[in-house]
Image (cartoon, grey):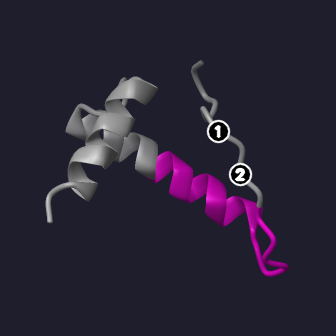
């Protein structure tokens, strides 16, 4: 699934700029690679979310 998102995105803002979104997604992808989280499965992501929600 290289160069794709595992989810759909709907953007309703009329001021939305595709170029800015692409730059942001590339930066997030770069950061995920640097942090070792780029290859997380959906199950791992959900486990992290649930752990975070249960912390407090």
Quadrant of the rendered structure where residue 33 is?
A: top left
Residue at x 81%, y 71% (from the top left corner): 12
**Residue 36 relative to residue 18: left or right:** left
Residue 45 position in % (x across, y down): 36, 36
Please tell me whether residue 30 belongs to the stretch shown in magenta: no
> What mark, if any, has residue 9 been given in the picture?
2
> What mark, if any, has residue 49 been given in the picture?
none
Quadrant of the rendered structure where residue 20 is?
A: bottom right
Q: Are marks 2 and 1 in contact (CB under 8 Å)?
A: yes
Closer to us: 40 or 54: 54
Please tell me whether residue 18 belongs to the stretch shown in magenta: yes
| Residue carrying label 1 | 7
Residue 36 position in % (x across, y down): 23, 31
Crowd band around label 2 with a 10 angstrom C-alpha radius: few (<14), some (14–19), many (20+): few
Give the magenta part as a residue range.
11-27
Position of the N terminus, as image quadrant, is top right
Q: CA distance from mark 2 to mark 1?
A: 7 Å
Farthest left residue in view: 55
Task: For mark 2, give the secondary structure.
Answer: loop
Residue at x 45%, y 28% (from the top left corner): 42
Residue at x 38%, y 42% (from the top left corner): 30
């Amino acid at each position: 699934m290289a160069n794709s998102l595992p989810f759909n995105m709907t953007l309703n803002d009329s001021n939305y700029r595709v170029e800015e979104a692409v730059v942001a997604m590339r930066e997030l992808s770069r950061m995920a690679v640097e942090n070792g989280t780029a290859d997380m499965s959906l199950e791992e992501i959900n486990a992290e979310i649930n752990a975070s929600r249960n912390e407090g």
